[in-house]
């Protein structure tokens, strides 16, 4: 293996000149000019299975295609369509005149991500149980056995009546 300095000398560049990484390894800067919605308030997320993060005074920017452009805490500066937002992680967002800014209520919060907000009748009897499991483990341990009991229509009627 040849060091970047050795490659540089071999290619006629002075020693110490850095060889730029191959183009396919260069990450483009995120475009921030297509933010159509900024939500301000408390954002709660879970970047890892065992971590719960609460970001106060957060700003969360959403692109026109629906993806999150940025999320940072500690922003108390005034914002309005047409103003700029300087991000601590780098970059400045110039909010378009059509950008919508939503302030969450004082006790409100946003929890982005895949959040299970529905249930099926076979899951009524164990609602809130087993959420520490991975999905397939949870299905095998709780949902599929419960679904099998629904072959008995009297059982199904009793569960659905009590739901």
Image (tube, rainbow, N blue to C red):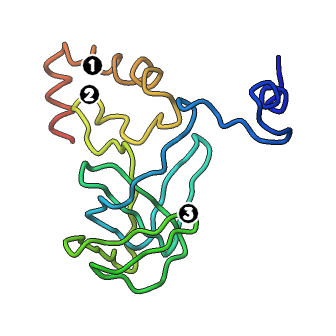
Neighbourhood count class around disc 2 (C-alpha, 10 Å): few under 14, some 14–19, many 20 upward: many
Q: Is residue 74 above or below residue 117?
A: below
Judged by depth in the image, the label closer to the viewer, 2 or 3, is 3
* Residue name at image x 17 percent, y 34 percent: 160
In percent of width and height, residue 101 lies at: 28, 74
Check the image and name the residue furthest to the front. Answer: 12
Q: Quadrant of the N terminus?
A: top right
Q: Secondary structure at mark 2?
A: helix
Q: Secondary structure at mark 1?
A: helix
Disc 1 or 2, which lies upstream in sequence? 2
Residue that badge 2 annotates: 122
Residue that badge 3 annotates: 90
Left or right: where does residue 98 sit relative to residue 111? left
In percent of width and height, residue 21 lies at: 64, 34
Left or right: where does residue 48 sit relative to residue 108? right
Q: Quadrant of the C terminus?
A: top left
In percent of width and height, residue 154 lies at: 15, 22
Q: Are marks 1 and 2 in contact (CB under 8 Å)?
A: yes
Residue that badge 1 annotates: 147
């Amino acid at each position: 293996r040849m060091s970047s300095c050795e490659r540089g000398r071999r290619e006629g560049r002075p020693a110490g000149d850095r060889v730029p990484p191959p183009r396919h390894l260069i990450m483009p800067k995120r475009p921030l000019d297509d933010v159509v919605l900024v939500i301000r308030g408390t954002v709660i997320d879970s970047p890892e299975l065992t971590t719960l993060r609460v970001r106060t005074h957060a700003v969360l920017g959403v692109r026109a295609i629906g993806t999150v452009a940025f999320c940072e805490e500690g922003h108390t500066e005034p914002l309005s369509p047409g103003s700029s937002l300087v991000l601590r992680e780098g970059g400045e967002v110039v909010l378009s005149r059509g950008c919508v800014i939503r302030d969450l209520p004082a006790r409100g919060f946003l929890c982005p991500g895949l959040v299970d907000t529905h249930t099926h009748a076979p899951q009524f009897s164990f609602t809130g149980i087993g959420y520490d499991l991975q999905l397939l483990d949870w299905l095998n341990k709780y949902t599929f056995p419960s679904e099998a009991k629904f072959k008995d229509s009297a059982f199904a009627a009793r569960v659905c009546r009590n739901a």
